[in-house]
Image (cartoon, rainbow, N blue to C red):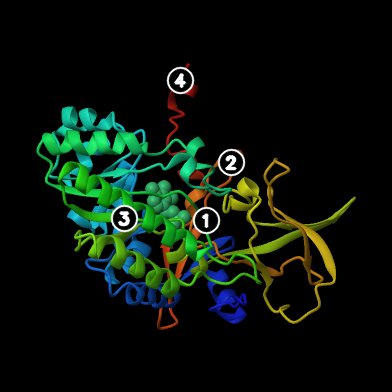
Amino acid sequence: MSVKELPFSKSLIEKIIEEYPTPFHVYDERGIRENAKRLLKAFSWAPGFMEFFAVKATPNPYIMKICRDEGFGADCSSLPELILAERTGITGEKIMFSSNNTPPEEYIKAREFGAVINLDDITHIPFLEKTTGLPDVLSFRYNPGPLRKGNVIIGKPEEAKYGFTREQLSEGYRIIRDMGVKRFGLHAMVASNELDPEYFIETARMLFEVVSEISRELGIQFEFINLGGGFGIPYRPGQKPIDIDFISKGIEGVYHIIIKNGGFHPLKIFIESGRMITGPYGFLVSKVLHKKNIYKKYIGLDASMANLMRPALYGAYHHITVLGKENLPASGIYDVTGSLCENNDKFAIDRELPEMDTGDIMVIHDTGAHGHAMGFNYNGKLRSAEILLREDGSYTCIRRAETVDDYFATLDFTDLHRA
Ligand SMILES: *Cc1c(COP(=O)(O)O)cnc(C)c1O
């Protein structure tokens, strides 16, 4: 059972607010590091195990630097993400480039950095060959279609835009083998925010089976499989965190049977997790601006869905703590809203919370992944700051809040007034 604890005190947050007004996201360095170490320990049996942190989850170089320190690589899917990885000091084959519908300049940059390229479609073999020539290592993303169930965030595999069909995999590896590619990888990601550990063991089994089939069929040796991301976190207080030791042991068992006994050892195991790495270690801090009672009771925050889109986008649950009121009874039922002119701009609907006052500080939990990163400027909303709580108890602003000038930075008003 997961208890929704906070890694900081109310007084520390009040001190930070004096310097950096709300709203902002705050990240817990200690939590990220301890979790990273647990993950690597769990997979210490696996030859060449590697986590490529999914940059899109928290594209901030300070967070990525923590990941790099812990031995992680970076999973990128766009040009700016590649540049972020490189500028954080994550280079070469510590970058996994898992993109889709990829423009040529992104392949060019990925090749320039020596990243491992994971192709999303069979037509990208000639596209990449024409753009940069083929590298000596290539990976393909597998979409198992109706063979696997997906989930609500990623959808059913047969309706998902990603990956190769099973037939295309055989065809694709044969083509690249004949074109001189020497090192082969296989990737799949068919779930998102999945909390069932069996799911990942089954994905590994599926990939191991494909590896053994194609190795036999084409006489090639696979170097790695990449299980993708999609490891879930307990957003709700009653949910259990995913048991990574259980997943690892389960995968080890299947590895033994299919890979070791099949004669395909060693095969490296990669993952490209984002949410599980930083999600639980980020918090959106916001103040209550207004209370409003009409047909329902509303609490209006100074944050909006521009700072955290998940509740509006997927109806996702994010736990809310009112600082200093943790032990008061949840005596009211509220919708917790932002200020966007969109009625789905709500962090919570019909949430039981303690009696609240304007000026109260609300902490929205589990915003460390796909939180600030999904921010946007619709309705003239400015993106918030990001603060890193250091292991020694100090804190650093790792991204300042946007200003109105930032919002206008891509506009030039001069011609407007010339006539
Ligand atoms: C989004 C994504 C990830 C990370 O997903 P999480 O749910 O954050 O673990 C990894 N790989 C690919 C290809 C993705 O699109």
Q: Mark 4 or mark 1: which comes first in sequence? A: 1
Which residue bears the numbered disc 3? 208
Query: What's the residue type where badge 4 is placed?
Result: Arg
Q: Mark 3 or mark 1: which comes first in sequence? A: 3
**Residue 389 position by quadrant:** bottom left
What separation in Å lies between label 4 and label 1 (alpha carbons)?
A: 41 Å
Give the image location of residue 416, x and y in percent. 49, 23
Check residue 418 in the rendering and tell me which mark sits there, or answer none: 4
Query: What's the residue type where badge 1 is placed?
Result: Gly
Query: What's the residue type where badge 2 is placed?
Result: Gly
The mark closer to the camera, 2 or 4, is 2
Query: What's the residue type where badge 3 is placed?
Result: Phe
Q: Nearer the viewer, residue 250 or 15?
A: 250
Give the image location of residue 207, x and y in percent. 34, 52
Q: Are marks 3 and 2 in contact (CB under 8 Å)?
A: no
Which residue bears the numbered disc 2? 380
Which residue bears the numbered disc 1? 371
Q: Is residue 414 visible to us here? A: yes
